[in-house]
Every structure is written in C-alpha cells, then in structure tokens.
Image: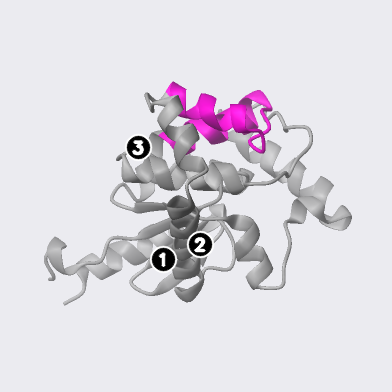
Amino acid sequence: MRSHAQIARPMFFIGAMSPYSWLAAERISQLLPHAIWQGVLAGAIFKANGRSSWGLDEQQRDARMADCEARAAARGLGPLRWPQPWPTNDVAVARAMLFAQRHGALEPFALAAMRMAFCEGTDLGELGAVLEAGRRVGIDVDELRRALADQELKDALRAATAEALAAGVFGVPSVIVEGQLFWGDDRLEEAAAATRRGAAST
C-alpha cells in the first residue's frame, strides 16, 4: 500500500458563477476532504473548448436551472435564488479566488461568494459583491480591491486557467484524481471512489 505522501491529492476546479460548482463545493469536504481547490476563469475554459455556459442556451437553461434548484432543495441548501442577470462576467471573482488562495482563504472565500450568488441572488459580476465576499471571510477589502487591478494577478489567473486546460479541464466543477478527470457535481462520488482505490493500490 502506498503512503499518503506517494498519493497525489485530488484537484478540485471551480468557477464561482457556476451553480454546479457551488453544489459540489458544499459537499466536497465530506467526500474528498483532502482535495486541493483551484478557481479558474470559467468563461475562458468554455471559450478554449468552443463551448459556452448552458445558462446562455435557451434549449437547456430552464431544465438545468430546475435541476440545480431540485439538488439544492434535496440537500437542504435551498431555496436557490438566481442572480439577475445570470450568468454575468466572472473575471473579477475569478481573480479574487486566486488572491484568496494566496492568502490561504480560497475555500471560505469561494463558498462565501457562491452562497451570495445562489442563496442571496447577488450578482458576482459586480465589484462590490466580490469585495463583500472578501469582507465576510476577513480579507482586507482595500487590499483586495488593489489586487484585482494588478497586472500580475491578471497574468497569474491566465496561467492558472491555462494549467487547468492543459490538465484536461473543459468545464466546472471538475475533479482530477491521479490524471483521471471527473466533470460535474454528480461525479464527486466516482472521484472519491477513485481516490480510495488509489490509496489502496500497491
């Protein structure tokens, strides 16, 4: 049996504007408590793969929204409140997730931001909403505001998103377990099972 030091920790990729990312983030600590969270610019992930958010697809939008609402209610997270408009630009909140990660606060920040979006109906495309998410988890708002305009942070987000693409990520949420990708909130159990198999292998 391999030691924990020999087993790569699962990577958990999220986009804060994604309701399925929120649903997955609310339960991943029970299924994959050692996963490393990584925020990405979901819009760039979609563009690189020739896709767009289902929230912009009239044929999928209503059914997918209803599915998210049903999952949230079944898990005691509802009622889900959709921001108006949704989806909107995710650049600022994606940069803020990277800033929070650097300060050891990605998980609480991402959860605070996504709860604001999908429990309170807050538009994360607004700078004020992103700053408020930071304030709620103890991040210095003035420091965060300055960082969001910093070119270095912008470049770092591009690099983090490019790394996710290189690893095979084409949508969020996604979990990568020793090179195997699991896309979607409904595949967390499979990712957890793969992690257990990896820990038990020789």
Q: Main secondary structure of the magenta part?
A: helix
**Which residue position holds label 3?**
105
Is residue 61 shown left or right of residue 50?
right
Q: Amino acid at mark 1?
A: Ile
Can I make out residue 4 in this image? yes
Classify mark 1: residues with Cα within 10 Å, few (<14), some (14-19) or many (20+). many
Q: In 3D space, how far apart are the residues under numbered discs 3 and 1 (Cα atoms)?
A: 21 Å
Q: In 3D space, how far apart are the residues under numbered discs 2 and 3 (Cα atoms)?
A: 20 Å
Does the segment drawn in magenta span residue 122? yes
Residue at screen point 37% across, 24% down: 138
Q: In 3D space, how far apart are the residues under numbered discs 1 and 2 (Cα atoms)?
A: 19 Å
Residue at screen point 44% across, 51% down: 153
Classify mark 3: residues with Cα within 10 Å, few (<14), some (14-19) or many (20+). some
Closer to the camera: disc 3 or disc 1? 3
In terms of image quadrants, where is residue 144?
A: top left
The segment highlighted magenta reads: 109-136
- Percent from the top left, x then y, of residue 174? 50, 60
Nearest to the observer: residue 180 or residue 102: 102
**Which residue position holds label 2?**
158
